[in-house]
Image (spheres, rainbow, N blue to C red):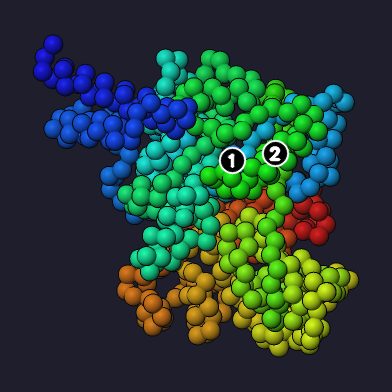
Amino acid sequence: MTNQSKIAKQIADLREILNEHNYRYYVADAPTIPDSEYDRVLRQLQDLEHKHPEFITPDSPTQRVGATPLTAFTQIKHEMPMLSLDNAFDLAEFSAFYNRVQDRLHTTAEIEFACEPKLDGVAVSLLYENGLLTRAATRGDGSVGEDITQNVRTIATVPLKLRSNQLPKRLEVRGEVYIPKADFSKLNQQAMNNQQKTFANPRNAAAGSLRQLDANITATRHLAFFSHGLGTIEAKVFPQRHTLQLEHLKLLGLPIAPYLETALGMQACEAYYQKMLQLRDSLNFELDGVVFKVNDINLQQQLGFVARAPRFAIAYKFPAHEEMTRLNSVEFQVGRTGILTPVARLEPVFVGGVTVSNATLHNMSEINRKDVRIGDYVIVRRAGDVIPEVVAPIKAKRKNVKQIKLPQQCPVCRSELIIEDAGIAVRCSGGLFCSAQRKQAIKHFASRKAMDIEGLGDKLVEQLVDSEYVHDIADLYHLPREQLMSMERMGEKSVDNLLQAVEKSKTTTLARFLFALGIREVGETTAKTLANQLRDLTTIETADVETLQSLPDIGPIVA
C-alpha cells in the first residue's frame, strides 16, 4: 500500500469513528466515549486533512463551518409544497377533526394516529442525494424557501452523510430546527454580558441564527434538528406508516423527537396530549402542542389536502400561557385598510417567554362584551407567535376605573369614522389621505411575501411618509437619492442597497404584485388563484364579478 493510500484509509477510518459517535450521541442517545475523546479524534482528522487537503470531502465531519459568508440567500422552489397544519385548541375542535377523518374515510372504526411533540422551532427541508446532504431550505411561503445549506451544515445533529448500504437515490427530509432551552439561556446571558440585544424566545433565536449570512455565526448558536416527515422520495421501497418512516430515518442517522407513539382512537390521542402537557416544562426544548397524523400513508393520500394544510393531520395546541397585569390606557391604531384596533397599554408582564406591554382588545364589541375598563387588572394571554390579547378583567380587584370610549374621528387624520358589520368594525374614511393607512399600505407592499424590498423597514417608511416624500406606493419608484441621504441612519451604502432593492422589485411574479397591492380580502392564496387562473393584469382588471366568482375560493364579497 502506498503512503497516499495509507493516509486516505486513515482519514476514512477517523471519519467513520466520528460519524458513528455522532449517531450514538445525537440519534441513539447512547454515547460510548467522553467529549474529550471525541475532540481528540476530530483534531487528529483536522490535522491530517490540513496536511492533505486533496482528501477533504464535503461530507467530512470537519466541514461543518468555514464557508465564505454569503451576500444574500438564493431562493429554492419546493418540489412538494411545505404546508402548514390546521390547529385545534380544545377537545371539541380535536373531536371535530377526528369525526371529519372518519367521515371522509367512510368508517366508524377507530383510526390509528402517529403522535409527536410539536416543537416551537423553524421548519426546514433537507435534500439527500445518494446519501449526501446537497441542499437545505426554509419553508418560506410553502412554495418557495431560502437556500440555507451552509448554515444547516453547521448543525451537529444534521448528518452530512446518511448511514446505510441501501440509500434512497433522493430523499427529502422535513423537520424542525430549534435551540435547546439550556443553550437559549446561555445565548441570552452572553448577549447581556456583551450589552447586546437579547432574543425574545428560542424560536426567534433559531430563526435569526438560520438566516445569518455568515455560517460561522450560525455555528456558535448550538442549533439542533428533529425530523418529522418526508417530501420527495426516490427509493425502491419505503415504509408505508408514518411512525415506521420516522424510525427508518433514525436508522439512516437522522434524529427524531422523543415520545413518538401511536394511538388508536380519540381517547388514546387525548391521553397522549395530556401526558405531553404534563411533561412540557421538564423537556429541554420548547413545545407548544402535539401533532396527530393518520399513521397509514395510503389513508393519508386518500384524505388529501386543502389549499394550505393536509386533511390527515392536525396540531393540537397547548393552552396559552396567561398572566395578570394592569391596563393603564387604550390607544386606537389605524391599520392598512382603515380599521381601528383598540390596543391595551399594560404594566409590562412576562408571558409565554416574552415581556408583554401591549395587547389587542380586538374591537369595541369585544370590549363591551368582556366589560374591560381602563385601570382594570386583566388576564393577558399569549400563544406562540399570536399577538397577545386581553382575555378578561378581574372584577374583584376593580377600583377607580374608566370606560373605554371610541374616538369621535380618526385619531390620526381626523377623518369621519364609518361603522361597519353591525358595529363590530370601525373604519377611517380617509383612505390614503390618512398617513397611518399610507404607512401600513407601503409596509405591506414592501414586505417579504409581497414585493420584498429589503432595507425598506418600518422606521424608514414612517420617516418617508412623515417627511411627505412618499404619498403612495408609486413614489417608491421615484425616490431621489439626496432625500434618502437626509434620512436618519441612512448612509451612502444603505441608500445604494435600498435603491437596488427597489429596482430589483420591478421583476416579480403577478401573484406577489397582486398581494402587495393590499386589496381588501385578497391574501396570498387568493392572489395566487387570480394570477394562475387569469394569467395577466389586463385580464384581471377587466374581469367582471361573474368571472371572478367562477374562480376557486372567490365568493361575492371578494369579487
Q: Which residue is mark 1?
A: 82
The earlier-in-sequence mark between 1 and 2 is: 1
Viewer-nearest residue: 166 or 472:
166
Q: Position of residue 454 (x, y in %)?
A: 45, 63
Q: Residue at x 62, y 26 (%)?
A: 243
Q: Are marks 1 and 2 in contact (CB under 8 Å)?
A: no
Relative placement, left or right, of 472 versus 394 is: left
Which residue type carries mark 2? Lys
Choose top left, top right, bottom left or bottom right for residue 430: bottom right
Q: Position of residue 476 (x, y in %)?
A: 49, 72
Choose top left, top right, bottom left or bottom right for residue 248: top right
Q: Residue at x 71, y 77 (%)?
A: 327
Q: Position of residue 497 (x, y in %)?
A: 37, 66
Q: Residue at x 76, y 78 (%)?
A: 376
Relative placement, left or right, of 532 versus 76 is: right
Q: How many marks?
A: 2
Relative placement, left or right, of 220 versus 339 is: left
Q: Which residue is mark 2?
A: 275
Q: Position of residue 188 (x, y in %)?
A: 44, 59
Q: Residue at x 73, y 60 (%)?
A: 521
Label 1 residue SS: loop
